[in-house]
Image: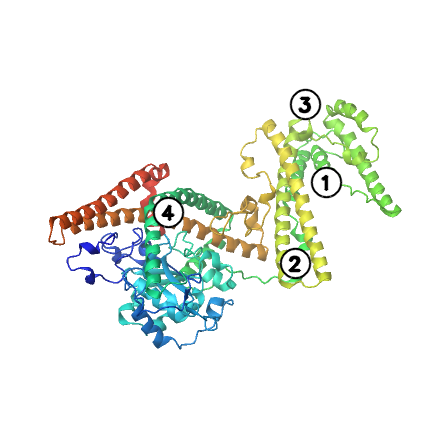
Amino acid sequence: MRAGRGHDPQGLENTQEGECVVKCPACPHPGINLPEGWNAKKSAEGWIYALFIAIDANFRLKRKAVSSDQSDPSLNRGWAYFVEEGTYKNYLSQRGNVPQEKSTCVSHNAVNMADSKSSRGLAATGVGTVDCAQHEMKLPNGVGDLQKGEKYVNMDYLVFSAIAHFAVLMFNFSYDIACQWHKKIWNCMVAMPQELQINHEEKIVRFFVPKFHLRAHIQKCQTAFSFNFTRGVGRTDGEAPDTKEMGPGARRDHLDDHFGDSNWKKRMALGCTITRKIADAVPRAEAHRQELEELEKILDRKELERWQVEYAAWEEDKSQPNPFESRVTRKLGWLAYEVTDSSMVAMTLSAVRLRLAEEEAKELSKHADVSLHAEVSPFILISSGLDIQDLHDVSALGLHATDLQKANITTRRNALQRKIDAWIQVQLLYMPSVAALRSQTSSDDAEDTANRAEKIKLMLPSELAAGTPCDTRLLRLEWDLRYAQADDALNEVQRSIQLYSHLSMFKVANIRGQKSNTRARSALDYAEKRKQQAKSKYTAARTALQTLAPLLGKVGWEDQLLPLRDADMRYLSDMLDGQTEGTRDMSWIWKSPDIAHNREEGLQDSLRIEWCKARARAERWQEEEILLREEMRRIECFLEWEKEQWRLRASARTFVTNAEREGCAAYAERQAALRGGIIESTTALWKTIPILRSTEGTESSNKSSMG
C-alpha cells in the first residue's frame, strides 16, 4: 500500500520492477525534482545533477541450501530492492564460467579468492548491494544473492539493474575495488540484457574508491581514484552502509521489508541530516578557502601559476602528470646531507646584523656616533649579549663523569664567565640602572659557585623590570635582533621537522637489522633534539618581543610570529588526531613568507603537493555546500511531487462499494498529508539555521565560481 499499488486502476499485475521501493528524495530524479533544462548544462555545471552510487557486498547475509524458488517463490518478483530472480539466474548461468580476473593493485581477497571461496551447504554466501552513496539508501533492483564470493559477474548485473532506473547524465561509482572493476566494465555490459545496457559514451561515468578503503591501495590508486582530489564530488565518502534458515523467496521478501524500513527511517531523518551537514560544510568551506589564500600569498607567483596549469591539465586528462604525487627521489646520502650541511643555516639574523653595522658605519662617517666605548658600540653590546645567551647551555656532567669530561666542562664554564664579566663592564656604561639590580642579586648567587656562569642574567633591555630606565636606541636594536632571531629559530624548526620526517620515511622503507635501526634511531633523536632546541630559542625570542613591543609601540607582529605549540611542530602532510585528508589543515609554521624562498628541492616538491591538496580541500567543501543546497531543493520538489501523486491516486481507481472507495481515498489523502507535513517541518527547520540565512546571497556566486 505504501507504494500506491493498491490505487492503480490496472491492478497489481501492472507493477513495474523496483516500483515498490522507498525512493531517496534527495537523489536526482529527472521529471520530478530536477529543473527544466538540467540536461542541457555543460559538464562543468551539471555535476550537481550526478548520481552517487556505492557498491558493496555483505557476507553476513548467508542463506543455507534449503528449499527452492519453486517451493518458496518470492512475492515481490523484483518489485522492490532485490532483482528479479529468474532473469538474474539465467544471466549468471550464461556467464558463470567466466574466470575472475586477478587484481593488479593490492591483494583484494574479495576479488582474488572469489572462485576459491567455500560455499559448502550454502545457497548464497552473501548479498551484493547498490546504494545511494550520499544518503545510504538502497536503490531499486540493486540487491542480489552472491553464490560464491564477490564476483564481477554478480556485481555488474546488480549495478546496471539499479542505474537502469535513473536517466541522469553523470554517474559517480564508489567501489572498494573500483581500480580493478572499471577496466572491463563496458565489455561486460555488452553481454547483459538489452534493457540494462546504457550508452556510456553519451554519459559521464567516474570511478572512485571509498575513503575508508583507499589507504589499502597502491599509491597510484590513492590519487587516481580519490574523492578528495576529484572535482564535482563535494565531501562524499563513498561508503555503503554495512536469516540463514529461510527459503529463498521468504528471505528476499524479508530483506526487502528491512531495506524499505531502513530507507523510510533515513528519509524521515533527511531534514536533520542535511541540517547537520550544511551547518558543518559552510564554515569549513570558508575556513579552507582562507587557508588556501594564506598559502598562496607566500608562494612564488611563477611557481604557483605553473602548478595551477598542471593541476587543471590533470583534472581534464588523468593521463597527464599527477600533481599529487612526489617527483623527488630521496636517498640516504641526501638525508645525511641534511644532517651536516651548514649552507642551510638561515641568513636572517646575519642580514639584520649587516644592516645595523652599515647604519653604524654611516653614523661614524657623519661624526654622529653616540658610542660610550671605544670598541663596543650599542649594536655590538646587544648583539654580543645575544651570542653569550646562546652559550649559556653548558652540558651537564653525567653521574660517573671522567676527569677529562669534568675538565672540559670547567674550561668551557670559565671561558663563559670571563666573557660575561667583560660584557657586564661595558653594559654599565650604556645601562647604568642595572648596577643597582645586580648588587641586589649578587648576594643570592654568591653561595652557588658551581653553576654561576650559566645562571647569570645578562639583563638585556627586554629582561629589565617594568619602569627601569633604558635608552630607546638599545630597545630598538634588541627588537631588530630578536625579531631576526625568532625568524631564524622558526626556520630551524622547519628544517628539523623536515629532516625528522624524511629520516622516518627512509627508516620505514629501507632500514633493516638491529645495528642499522639503532643508528637510524640516533639520527631521529638528533633531529628531535635540534627541533626542541630551536623551539626554546624561538620562545625566548618571542617572549622578549612581547616585552619590547609596548615600549616601542610595535603592533601586528604577533600575526606573523604566533605562539609555537608542540601541535604546531608537524610536517606539511602530518595530521592531528581526529583529522582526515578532507578536514586537516597545515600548521602555521609552513605559511611564513620565508618558506617560498627556500629552494631546497624536497621542500618545494612537498609544497606543491600540499598546495594541490589544500586547493582540493577548499574545492570539495565548496562543492559540498552547493550539493547540499541542491539536495534541499530536490527533497522539497520530490515530496511535492509525491504528495500530488497520492492526491491523484485518491480517485484513480473505481471500486464496487462506497466503503472501499472511501477507504482508498482516505489512505491516499493521509499519505499526501504526511508528505505535506514533512515538507512543512523540514523547511521550517532549515529556515531556523542562521548560517543559511547569512550565506543566501553568496550561493549563486559559488555556483558560478565552481563552473
Q: Nearer the viewer, residue 329 or 583?
A: 583
* Residue 335 image label: 2
Residue 481 visible at all: no
Mark 4, secondary structure of its residue: helix
User: Which residue carries the number 1 mark?
Assistant: 390
Of pointers 1 and 4, the one earlier in the residue sequence: 1
Q: Amino acid at mark 4?
A: Glu
Q: Identify residue type, mark 2.
A: Leu
Q: Nearer the viewer, mark 1 or mark 2?
A: 2
Please name the residue shown 53% across and 53% down the image: 607
Instruction: Please tell me which residue lies in front, 385 or 136.
Output: 136
To which residue does mark 4 refer?
A: 625
Residue 229 appears in view: yes
- Sooner in the amino-acid sequence: mark 3 or mark 4: 3
Picture disc at residue 469: 3
Marks 1/3: CA–CA distance:
26 Å
Q: Amino acid at mark 1?
A: Asp
Give the distance between the C-alpha atoms of the residues marked 2 and 3, in whole angstroms: 50 Å
Splitting the image into 4 quarters, where does residue 509 fall? bottom right
Q: Residues within 10 Å of mark 3 (few under 14, many from 20)?
A: few
- Which disc number belongs to residue 186? none
Location of residue 555 in the rendering, given as x and y in whole percent from the top left corner: 54, 32
Q: Position of residue 116 (x, y in %)?
A: 48, 73
Task: Tell whether 554 sits left or right of 159.
Answer: right
Check whether the beta carbons of the residues at disc 3 and disc 4 lie within 8 A of each other. no
Residue 288 lies, in percent from the top left, at: 45, 46
Q: Amino acid at mark 3?
A: Pro
Task: Tell me which colouring the rendered structure shows.
Answer: rainbow
- Nearer to us of marks 3 and 4 is 4
